[in-house]
Image: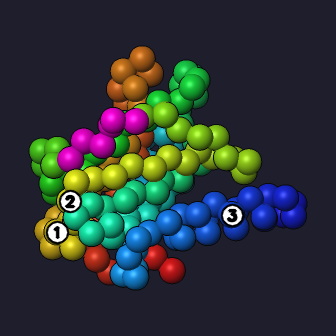
Amino acid sequence: MNPRHSLAALMITASLFGCTTSSNPGVSVTLVPTRQNAGQIGNVVLSDWGKQTGLSFFISGVPTGASLPLRLYSFINKGSCQQPGPVAYAMNDKVTTERQPIRGWSFSRSAPVALPALLSSEHSILVRTAATDGNVDIFCGDIKQENPAK
């Protein structure tokens, strides 16, 4: 691996884990691509911010043809990815993303709910493209307490 890319990956990882305001460990959630985004990978780290939860996303890509600047919407739904329930929290006050030096995109959001409350019942995270790009669900991940961020 190119040393520049290794350094960039290290900086992204450090920024994901170094921005919390709590000594509580975060929770890492693997984002599974949908059929419309096959072959891509994603991850989100949830951090305890007291009465809010911070979410730091990294995804490797989006469906071909997505317009730039890339705009992604994110939601926390009740239920799982396999059996989704209604939207519990829409986190779309800011929808722009930032291209990373290594192949991928990052973005951050916050949800007006404490992390322990999210972990106490079944929730999932959904990432969707903008309406101009088809309003396509591209990633989903189940929030589980047993995935502490390292």
**Which residue type does callout 3 highlight?**
Met
Identify the residue at image location x=16%, y=69%: 117
- Residue 81, visible in the rendered structure: no
Q: Quadrant of the N terminus?
A: bottom right
Identify the residue at image location x=12%, y=44%: 86
Q: Which residue is mark 3?
A: 11
Is 142 on the left or on the right of 18, as rendered?
A: left
Camera-side residue of 17 and 75? 17
Residue 6 versus residue 97 in the image, above or below: below
**Which contiguous range is marked in magenta?**
89-94
Is 100 on the left or on the right of 112, as rendered?
A: right
Residue 117 numbered tag: 1
The CA span between labels 3 and 2 is: 28 Å
**Which of the 4 image quarters holds residue 143?**
bottom left
Residue 62 versus residue 33 in the image, above or below: above
**Which residue type does callout 2 highlight?**
Val
Seen as rendered, the residue at the extreme top is: 132
Q: Position of residue 108 (x, y in %)?
A: 45, 50
